[in-house]
Amino acid sequence: MKQRDRFCGFTLIELLVVIAIIALLIGILLPALAETRRTARLTVCTSNMKQMGTAMGSYATEYQDRIVSFTWTASDGHSQYADLEAQRRQGNTASSSAQAIDILRRRAGRADIQPIASWIPQVLYTHLVMQDYLASRLPEKLVVCPEDQNRLDWQRDPPNRFDQGYWSPLQEPPSETNKRWPYSSSYEVVPAAYDRYQSVIDNNVRSLRVRQSTDHRTYQINASSSFGNLRAADVDFPGKKVAWMDSAQRHFGAKDIYYGYPEARVTLLMFDGSVNVFYTYEANQGWNPAAGTLTSPSLYFYSPSQWEPEKPVGGWDPPYDRLPGYYRWTRGGLKGVDFGSQEIDTGQL
């Protein structure tokens, strides 16, 4: 009788060694895969901003070299909605607010969004004018950084989710005025693109300029401030002047960092349509529009909501307290420079 072959298998030690090797390989590969995904999202982000830059150029070509912005005033513009038409006639930011909500009602089907008082839509909603020009449906992922997961979540069925507090605490609290938030952008427009007095070299108008309040999300305006209808030709250094900025570093490091911290690396759209990634500390610190000839920058406190990046801890000297405005508040407005050279002496130094 033939003897059977002896069965061969793995010992427990051999199996544990194989498992350990697999775990080690996974540990090595996962960070590389995560970095690859981040790189891909950075590519999408820069592509989004380049498309916005192209649209900005097309808008200027079609509308007499105008920089894209809200254009309604007390004497110009029209809404098919009686309540918004009444608000438009109030002028100033009320006209801009009426135009923004008019677009949301028509392009997003949000007839339920009511007029909003004391709102400056230019900061995070100027893209609505561009998307209305392009006849886009809203909300639109193009205006949201692919790493800005909170805003991408807010865009998902806003009436039945965001408006009901579904994303709490990572959203603004549900309210009539907060229904606008799912249609906001990750990319903030600099005041020089919409504030007509930001670029005027005359200290007599400094009280009319939009300026920073004490908090990173609040601004101060004058009842006689003037908005929109600025020309692209008024930009003296289009390749060195920021037009749209991501409000945070999202593509580098373990955590997002608010743009105002010097170590943040932020995606920026320049007025010439180019997209760059710069450290904030590489920029000029900007100015205080209300201070006239003083050389000190705008300073404000960063007080993040739960859906915004946390304050970074340590790692920079001097210690964090109030942050400079940097390219949000460029000295000279459209006549000034953010990157590549020192601030331009426009008569305001």
Image (cartoon, helix red, strand yellow):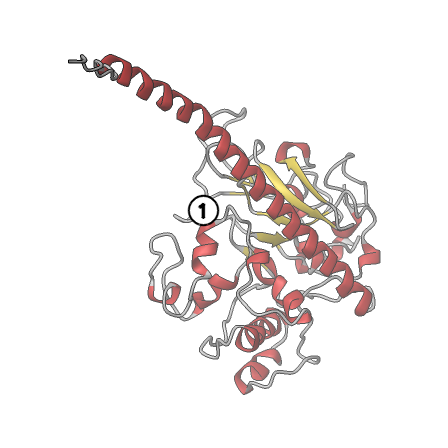
Residue 259 position (above or below residue 128)? above
Image location (x, y in percent) of residue 18? 33, 18
Whether residue 298 can be seen here = yes
Q: Secondary structure at mark 1?
A: loop
Residue 12 is drawn in which quadrant?
A: top left
Q: Is residue 242 left or right of residue 97?
A: right
Residue 277 position (above or below residue 157)? above
Q: Quadrant of the C terminus?
A: top right
Image location (x, y in percent) of residue 1? 15, 13
Residue 270 position (above or below residue 317)? below
Q: Is residue 340 left or right of residue 128?
A: right
Question: Residue beneath label 1, please?
Answer: 308
Residue at figure coordinates x 69%, y 51% from the top left: 50
Furthest residue in direction left, as rendered: 1
Q: Which of the two residues, 148 or 303, is positioned nearer the viewer here?
A: 148
Residue at figure coordinates x 63%, y 48% from the top left: 245
Residue 40 is drawn in which quadrant?
A: top right
Residue at figure coordinates x 43%, y 39% from the top left: 310
Q: In the rendered picture of this protein, how many numbered marks are placed on residues? A: 1
Q: Which of the two residues, 297 or 177, is positioned nearer the viewer here?
A: 177
Q: Is residue 203 left or right of residue 16?
A: right
Image location (x, y in percent) of residue 253? 51, 32
Whether residue 224 can be seen here = no
Image location (x, y in percent) of residue 206? 70, 55
Specify the amino acid type for callout 1. Glu
Residue 168 is drawn in which quadrant?
A: bottom left
Furthest residue in direction front, as rendered: 1
Q: Badge 1, how many Cα within 10 Å: few under 14, some, many 20+?
A: some
Residue at figure coordinates x 65%, y 72% from the top left: 135
